[in-house]
Amino acid sequence: MRIDILTLFPEMCEVVLNESIVGRARKNQLVELYCHNIRDYAFNKHRRVDDAPYGGGKGMVMQAEPIFQCYQAVCNQSNLSQKPYVIYLSPQGNVLTQQKSIAYSQMDHIILLCGHYEGVDERVIEAIVDEEVSIGDYVLTGGELPALVLTDSIVRLCDGVLSDAECFEQESHYHGLLEYPQYTRPEVWQERTVPEILLSGHHANIEKWKLQQSLERTKQKRIDLFEEYIAKNGEK
Ligand code: SAM
């Protein structure tokens, strides 16, 4: 799996991509992650990549050509057997879900385009973008944080990144439910005890308890997800 991030702030992305589980996956070459500075493809001596919007209005718009040149440079760099899947991070896009991240994690090569200011010239979206993805119904300053959120959610699903597929298969949203509550040492903390069943060593009963807890907390916290799950899987 290869992900290329096209951005005006590559250093901001590098800091995050070099940390923790994603950083380790990168170091161990389980995934290829690259950041590219769109400004390197500016075509004027001041390295400007934005201009005022046609028709008036506040703010600046990122120009199409530097983005297109940056995209082409990535395509020329990699030995492409097919066009990379290009995602523009945008508050106007499809909202990211775990199911989407699972689908992206099975792709070979994704390019993430980060907008800034008022966004990017619509024509470059028409020319190169396959999908617009939002991380929620609110507006951020730039696409870098959304691109990092998306990258993290994809990378942790790639082969060998977590110790076992069970690590993510049991987590919230993978099968449509929220995860059961978790506990660790000590057994008693501020007079609060760990549920006895978890100390019983009875594997089958523990699994039953976990599913029951998942169902209960999904019903309590996210009735929308619960109803969807029951419609698909029936009452448990
Ligand atoms: N003018 C745009 C609009 O109203 O749709 C918003 C532009 S926003 C200030 C600048 C950039 O941040 C966008 O081009 C996009 O790349 C990114 N962005 C902001 N909010 C986002 C979100 N919720 N999800 C994904 N990307 C977002």
Image (cartoon, grey):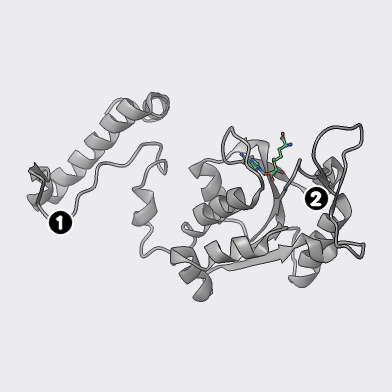
In the displayed structure, does residue 49 sit left or right of residue 93? right
Spot occupied by residue 100 in the image (x, y as percentages of width and height): 55, 44
The structure residue drawn at horizontal position 76% and vertical position 58%, both measured from the top left corner, is 83
Q: Nearer the viewer, residue 103 or 146?
A: 146
In the displayed structure image, the side of residue 120 where residue 104 appears, left or right: left
Q: In which quadrant of this rendering is ligand 1 seen? A: top right
Seen in the picture, residue 181 relative to 201 is either above or below; the reply is above
Taking the image as shown, residue 86 lies to the left or right of residue 215, namely right
Q: Is residue 187 above or below residue 54?
A: below
The answer to whether one can see residue 106 in this image is yes
Q: Tell me the residue that label 1 is attached to.
A: 185
Precedes in sequence: disc 2 or disc 1: 2
At label 2, which amino acid type do we have?
Ile
Q: Is mark 1 within 8 Å of ligand 1?
A: no
- Residue type for callout 1: Arg
Q: CA distance from mark 2 to mark 1?
A: 51 Å
The residue that label 2 is drawn on is 128
Work out whether 124 lies above or below 29.
above
User: In what quadrant of the picture does the C terminus appear?
Assistant: top left
Q: Quadrant of residue 196?
A: top left
Residue 158 rendering spot, x and y as whole percentages: 49, 61
The residue shown at (66%, 44%) is 141
Q: Quadrant of residue 220?
A: top left
Judging depth in this view, the residue of 59 and 155 nearest the camera is 59
Callout 2 touching callout 1 (CB < 8 Å): no
What is the x, y in percent for residue 184?
A: 18, 54
User: Can you say which quadrant of the picture contains the N terminus?
Assistant: bottom right
